[in-house]
Structures are given as structure tokens and as C-alpha cells.
Image (cartoon, rainbow, N blue to C red):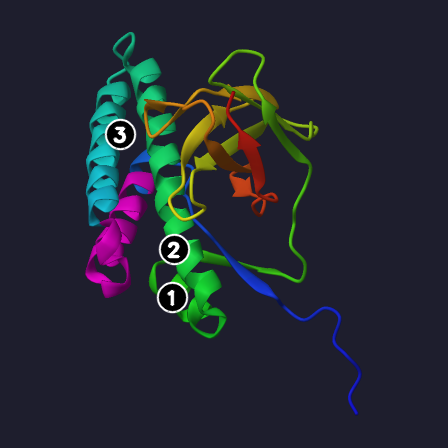
Amino acid sequence: MAPNNTNAVKRLICEFEKPSNISKRVTYYLKFLLLMLDNPLFTSIATLLGSAQTQVGKLNTAEIAAAGKVPGTAALRDEELLATEIIMEQVLAEVQKKGDANFAAAKALFESLLLKIRERSTTEHGEFEATQGKLSKTIDVRRQVLKGKRGYLTMISIDKEKWFIGAFGTTALDTVDNINDEPLVVGTNYYLKSRTRYKNVYSDWSQIVEVTCI
């Protein structure tokens, strides 16, 4: 009998192949979104894909303006870049869910969408805590503090099916006070998860934490 392979791949993680040049990144994102729209697996998120296309268009306009070096345009471009990265991560999360649901087809799916693939032999949880907030209708989140300039993304859900941005930034401590732009509701159980970005590479999602809003 052959020995057990303890390093067997248990999960494939998809990641963007993001160029550092903003104009090239816009082109890459638009190609990716067109492929998503053409794929019948993602008809249920057509609204999200349309919103992402609109946001990438805003980034493109802002980048063109910033190239003219008019005061204030670079700051606006950076705002649009952050908004773009947030919504594109939402789209990427939808692709990851499809890959997780069908491991055998995940590699072909990710490659067809121009995505990088990272193999995971274990689930990369990291340290993440979510607790009832110091103020009513808030949830405090705490991530593991890591060296280097890190970005932290926290997602929130009420059913572990549809996820929304809860907090996004460079601080390991943050507070979530809304879900899909609606205030949190006292007595409702919310689910939260987090991931860390370093040099444009994201970790796997943390464990999911359940918190009752007070």
C-alpha cells in the first residue's frame, strides 16, 4: 500500500495577476469581467459584475486625469483604486466559491478567467477575532499584527452565503457598523471572516466567527 501523501493539495486558491501599472490593471480587470459575464456559472451575480465594470471605468477615467498631473487628480485616482480593489475582491470571492464547490474543475475555471493559482495543503486560518462592539450596533474585529505594510479585509454575512465588505484598510483593529450599507440590527447573529494582503498577495480566509449584535 502506498504511503499517505500528507502534502496532498486540498484546496486551490485563485488570485488576480495584477499589473502594477494602473492602466494595464484596468485592461486586465476588464478582460476578466468580460470572461465572467460570458460564463453561465456567474449569471446570478450579473449585477455585481456590472457594478464592478462601472467602477473599473471610473478608475480608468481617474488614471487618465492623474496622468496630466493636475493637482488633486492623483488623490482621486487613489480613492477610485481602493474602491476598485474592494469590489474586485468581492467578485474574486465568488470565483473562489465556485472553485471550492468543485475541486476537480477549479484549475480549469481559474485559468479560463486569467487568474493565478496557489495550492494549499492546509487551511490557512491565521488569528482573527470578532467581538461585540464597545458601542451598540457595532462589532469590533482584531487581526493578527504582522510586520510590513499590510492590508486587512473583513467580510460580514448573515447567512454565510452572501458576503459584504465589513472593513478594509491597513489597521489590524477595526469596527464594523453596517452590512451592505444597512446598520447592524440588535439581536441578529452575524458571521465575519478576514484575510490579509501583503505585496498584492492575499492569505486564505480566516475561520468564520459568529457574533451577536447588541
Residue tagged 1: 109
Tag 1 secondary structure = helix
Point 19% across, 35% down: residue: 54
In the rendered image, is residue 121 in sight? yes
Q: Which residue matches tag 3?
A: 59
Q: CA distance from mark 3 to mark 2?
A: 22 Å
Instruction: Report the front residue among 49 and 142.
Output: 142
Q: Position of residue 30 (x, y in %)?
A: 25, 46
**Residue at screen point 35% across, 41% down:** 88
Looking at the rendered structure, the kind of residue marked 2 is Val
In magenta, the rendered stretch is: 25-45
Q: Quick one: quadrant of the N terminus?
A: bottom right
Residue at 58 percent of width and 22 percent of height: 132
Q: Are marks 2 and 1 in contact (CB under 8 Å)?
A: yes
The mark found on residue 95 in the picture is 2
Query: Of marks 3 and 2, which one's residue comes earlier in the chain?
Result: 3
The stretch drawn in magenta includes residue 29: yes
Horizontally, residue 54 falls left or right of residue 10, namely left
Image-based side of 36 in relation to 142, left or right: left
How far apart marks 3 and 1 lie (CA) works out to 27 Å
Q: Which mark is residue 91?
A: none
Please check the rendered image and state whether residue 94 is part of the magenta-colored stretch, yes or no: no
